[in-house]
Amino acid sequence: MTTTEPTTLDQQQAASQGDRTRPLSVVEQRDTADALLGLVDALPDNQREVVQLRFNGQLPYREIAHVTGHSVSHVGVLLHEAIKTLRVQMLRLTA
């Protein structure tokens, strides 16, 4: 059994770099990121704030608690609720 090697430079590059470099894949990723950002913007203020501090600011829970005035455990609850909401809404968008 023999495998077929890519014949053109474009095919070779696509084979070596995978789907992430295909134009359609890049557009799909950008669309998904844009949709997610829109959903984050629609979260309640307290959830949006902790999501942005955690994922954009890359702050640990303790620092988020200090910045927001919430307890560390409440930061965890807010993040959990936000992520659950975002997951459900993203599934609805892709269904």
Image (spheres, rainbow, N blue to C red):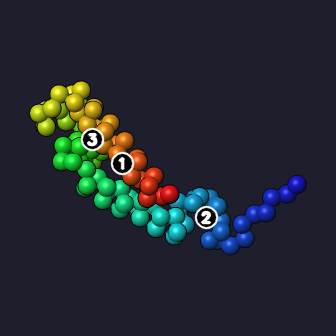
Which amino acid does the dot numbered 1 rest on? Leu
Residue 69 in picture, x, y percent from top left: 11, 33
From this viewpoint, which residue is outermost toward the right?
Answer: 1
Residue hosting label 3: 54
x 30%, y 43%: residue = 82
x 72%, y 66%: residue = 6
- Sequence-wise, the earlier of marks 2 and 1 is 2
- Sequence-wise, the earlier of marks 3 and 2 is 2
x 41%, y 63%: residue = 30
Foreground disc of the pair 3, 2: 3
36 relative to 22 in the view: left or right: left
Q: Cα distance, mark 3 to mark 2? A: 34 Å
From where the camera sits, is residue 21 visible?
yes
Q: Quadrant of the N terminus?
A: bottom right
Which amino acid does the dot numbered 2 rest on? Ala
The label shown at residue 86 is 1
Q: Cα distance, mark 2 to mark 1? A: 32 Å
